[in-house]
Amino acid sequence: MKTTWKALPEMVDLGRPEEPLRANTSTARVLRNEGNVEQALAGASPRISRSYVWPYQMHASIGPSCAVADWHPERLTVWSGTQNPYPMRRDLALLLGMPENAIAVERMEAAGCYGRNCADDVTADAALLSRAVGKPVRVQLTREQEHAWEPKGAAQVIDVSGGLDQEGGPAGYAFETRYPSNLAPTLALILTGRVPNKPQVTDMGDRTAIPPYAFGPMRITVHDMPPLARASWFRGVSAMPNSFAHESFIDELAFAAGVDPVEYRLRYLTDPRASIWCGP
């Protein structure tokens, strides 16, 4: 096989995601805008601003992905650890030009991944190889392949500004979160040209972006942006970083007010169910 290699495109340093995320093209989407936030923050004493950086993460399944495919002209059967058998069947139909009702996805218990690993990718690869050779084919990734090619859990950058009013309560709250989209398509669909290799932007950075606390004047903004790296869902999809930022910042407010952080939370929780878990 004669192979012609192309130079790799310049890549950002995913180990230091803050600057690339801030520089990434984005569209601001305001989820909530209540009261005069700027005026409230201008009168805060002290005014507090913090930034929180959530890194890219590997799913790092304990077992690398594996699948078996048995292709025939009139039908296809795959044995796969996919978490999404119906979308997987749809992808296979598009990949191979077959009707969905001619494809059976036998879902097998495989290594967990708290999101999405390479299970879909190896299933599609096995199907293509089985069609090429006319026999059942098993595709098993190595540990190195799994870690290199799996969709990563997306990084996130969150900026929060707030402060205290004269009574020591929250004077205002400005929250901005940047989350690169995570709809990584099955690799074979891109490599075969079945879907265009163009980044898709989705509005998935808003989970738990609105805090559970009564912060007075409040502005919550999500910056929707294309992916910087092949990414997919990873346990919560933006909810954990957003909640981490809220909870870290209210600790800052409680410390500045000289109040126990649990007591401070209970003062401003708006959901009675949450106060049950926060109470003594």
Image (spheres, rainbow, N blue to C red):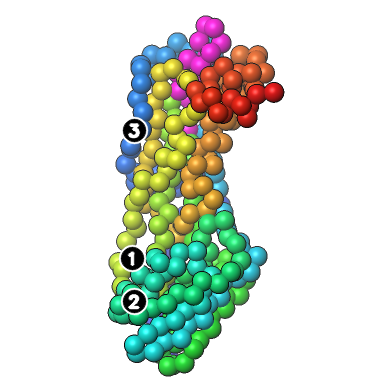
Direction bottom: furthest residue: 134
Height in image: 267 above or below 219? above
Question: Which is in the foreground here, disc 1 or disc 3?
Answer: 3
Earlier residue among tags 1 and 3: 3
Residue receiving disc 2: 101
Magenta region's main secondary structure? strand
Q: Work out whether residue 198 can be spotted.
A: yes
Pinpoint residue 172: horizontal percent, then vertical percent. Answer: 45, 18
- Residue drawn at x 35%, y 70% is 90
Q: Name the foreground residue: 52 vs 23.
A: 52
Which residue carries the number 3 mark? 30
Decide: is 233 above or below 248: below
- Residue that badge 1 annotates: 197
Magenta residues (range):
159-173
The picture quadrant where one finds residue 217 is top left
User: Which residue is more in the foreground, 118 or 228?
Assistant: 118
Mark 1 Cα-neighbour bin, 10 Å: few <14, some 14–19, many ≥20: few
Establish if 54 lies above or below 95: above
In front: label 3 or label 2: 2
